[in-house]
Image: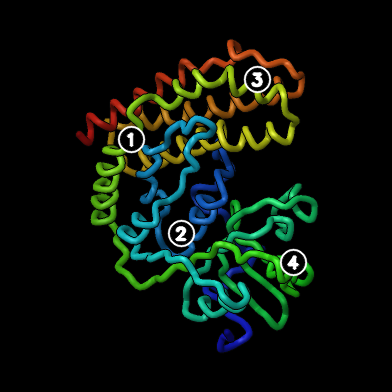
Amino acid sequence: MSSGSDSADLLGLSEAGWTPRLLHTDDRIWLETNCYVDVWAELLPALGHPAEAALAFTVLQDFEGDHFTFFKFPLEDLQILFGLAVQELAIYDTVESHTLGQLERGRPVLIEVDSHWLPDAGPAYRKAHVKTTVAAIALDRANRRFGYFHNTGYHELSGEDYDGLFRKPPAPDTLFPYVEFVKRDGEALTGEALRHCSIDLLYAHLRHRPRSNPIAAWRAALPKHLATLAARDMDYFHLYAFNLPRQLGANFEMLGTYLDWLAEPALADAAAAARRIAEGAKAIQFQLARMANRRRFDPAKLVLDSIEADYDRIMTALLAQYP
């Protein structure tokens, strides 16, 4: 497959000129959430859409036994709210060629990549191999330059990083990554129409909310989890922290932001409770880190009662407002 040119740039952005958007401001409790939510938190406003309008799905998070739900923007919600149709991109040539071909059509491309080659990946850069998702916005094949959203902002890479990211030359035993593209050809809602539609989605998501308190379920599982942490190394702890306290806290901070966006006076206390869960999850992560460093784990020292109660307060308020 070949594209019509050697470069495409959807938005004309620059790394130096990009300012993180609302969901990534410095005053956030959890500056980063997970790679998929973080990508959309920057991509949506870059395309002219308020990302906070699409956060109704955060009421769905549950405790899954070994992790909290890895929360993600439902693709159906993005299409209903913003007219964005996200589809899997069939990769049968090079990822580079397919990405360029879609960018030429005005479509952002979301690619699962190896953070080893991302200069913004912090400690993983050129040291570790960790799967993450980026949103391709600009690609210059001739000059080996790539512009993308990842984590909390817009970034650019080139040269050796470009070759590594796009696997040049390709290894014959390498699997194709999972790739999506975003068709921007539907109707985007604004104003009151957007708000009413978002509330309709909230009604639908509340019908599928957890049937019991997920924080209480985590507390019940903690003795077993801590026994596993005691038997494993710090690398395992960091994975555990990402998938449990971080996903819990980041999800509920996003829910608090959504309730602020709805601007319903009756939900002000619920928004504050959501932020307390975010803060409480961060405090628990710090407690777990100290336990892991000292190799002494005591579930009785992890106090979850208050954030369990806050979860119930949130759901009670939401169901009263949107029965």
Residue annotated with mark 2? 45
Q: Earlier in the sequence, mark 2 or mark 1?
A: 2
Quadrant for the C terminus in the image: top left
Amino acid at circle 2: Pro
**C-alpha span from label 2 to label 3:** 43 Å
CA–CA distance in space, label 2 to label 4: 29 Å
N-terminal of the two: label 4 or label 1? Answer: 4
- Residue 160 appears at what percent x and percent y? 79, 69
> What is the residue that sits farthest to the top in this orientation?
300
Relative side of 182 to 128, left or right = left
The furthest residue to the bottom: 4
* Residue 288: image location, x then y, percent: 65, 23
Mark 2 residue crowding within 10 angstroms, few (<14) / some (14–19) / many (20+): some
| Secondary structure category for the residue under label 2 | helix
Instruction: Give the residue type at disc 1.
Output: Arg
Which amino acid is tagged 4? Gly
Q: Do the residues labelled 2 and 4 touch (CB within 8 Å)?
A: no
Say if 80 sits above or below 187 in the image.
above
The residue drawn where x is 76% and y is 50% is 128
- Count neighbours of disc 4 (C-alpha within 10 A) and say few if under 14, some if 14 to 19, many if 20 or more: some
Q: Give the amino acid type for the residue marked by disc 3 in the picture.
A: Ala
Look at the numbered disc 1 and give the secondary structure of its residue: loop
**Which residue does the numbered mark 3 point to in the structure image?**
227
> Sequence-wise, which precedes: disc 2 or disc 3?
2
Front label number (1 vs 3): 3
The answer to whether 169 appears left or right of 194 in the picture is right
Q: Is residue 247 above or below residue 194?
A: above
> Residue 185, image x and y in percent?
35, 73
Q: Dots 1 and 3: beta carbons under 8 Å?
A: no
Dots 4 and 1: beta carbons under 8 Å?
Answer: no
What residue is disc 1 on? 209
In front: label 3 or label 4: 3
